[in-house]
Image: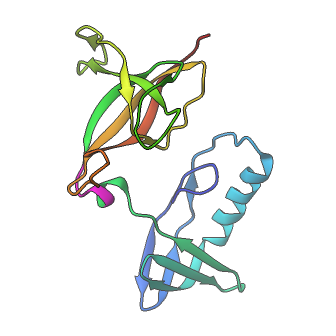
Amino acid sequence: MSNTCNRMVGGYTLAGDTLTLSPMASTMMACADPKLMALDQEAAKRLEGSVAFTHVDDTLTLATASGDVLVFQGEPTAETRYGGKGETVFLEIASQAKPCSHPLIPDQQCLQVRELKYDDKGIKTGTEGAFENFYGSIGGYTHEAGVRNVLRVKRYTISNPPADGSALAYELDMVVESETRP
């Protein structure tokens, strides 16, 4: 389970409409807001023991013996949305976006992106190409002017793209490197 700041995992057994959860294990990241850390701990406490559950479409509702009702809304993963595992690629994002022409969007600014290659040991290979306009978006990534990033992303092929859209979708996997530049 991914919650406010940390990730929690735990075992469970299912009997009828009762779900019995084992004590949760959690990462111990320092949350930016102490209230979020407290919320993490409280959620873990409430998710121990036996709870009644209902599952309708992508909503899971848990009712604890103490009367708490917890509602979880599922979200499809990128693999589900795009129908496959995707390809892992590395993109370098320049520190500044640049104007790029688009007939429907005046004053369009495009990220400047180039693909990087790494070998199986994580060593950069090949030569870096020129930066190119990137007209799309990268799910989970927000560009900050003045910051150059190297991202590991999953690239998915969209089976039926819109007529004015890309046939590729990108989702952030992790930020590999960041550097502040003027």
- Seen in the picture, residue 52 relative to 95 is either above or below; the reply is below
Apparent side of residue 150 relative to residue 26 in the rendered image (left or right): left
Q: How many marks?
A: 0
Q: Is residue 140 left or right of residue 114?
A: right
Q: Residue furthest top?
A: 127
Q: Residue at x 51, y 60 (%)?
A: 1
Q: Which quadrant of the view contains residue 25? A: bottom right
Q: Is residue 52 above or below residue 149?
A: below
Q: Residue at x 59, y 11 (%)?
A: 181
Q: Quadrant of residue 90?
A: top left
x, y percentage for residue 114? 34, 21
Which quadrant of the rendered structure holds the C terminus?
top right
Spot occupied by residue 150 in the image (x, y as percentages of width and height): 43, 23
* Residue at far bottom of view: 16
Which region of the structure is painted magenta?
81-85
Which residue occupies 22% across, 10% down? 126
**In front: 65, or 136?**
136
User: What is the basis of the colouring in this image?
Assistant: rainbow
The answer to which of 127 and 35 lies nearer the viewer is 127
The relative height of residue 166 versus residue 116 in the rendered view (above or below) is below
Q: Position of residue 65 (x, y in %)?
A: 66, 86
Residue found 53% across the figure and 56% down from its top: 2
The one nearer the camera, 11 or 148, is 148
Our reading of the magenta stretch's main secondary structure is loop
Q: Is residue 109 above or below residue 2?
A: above
Residue 69 falls within the magenta-colored stretch = no
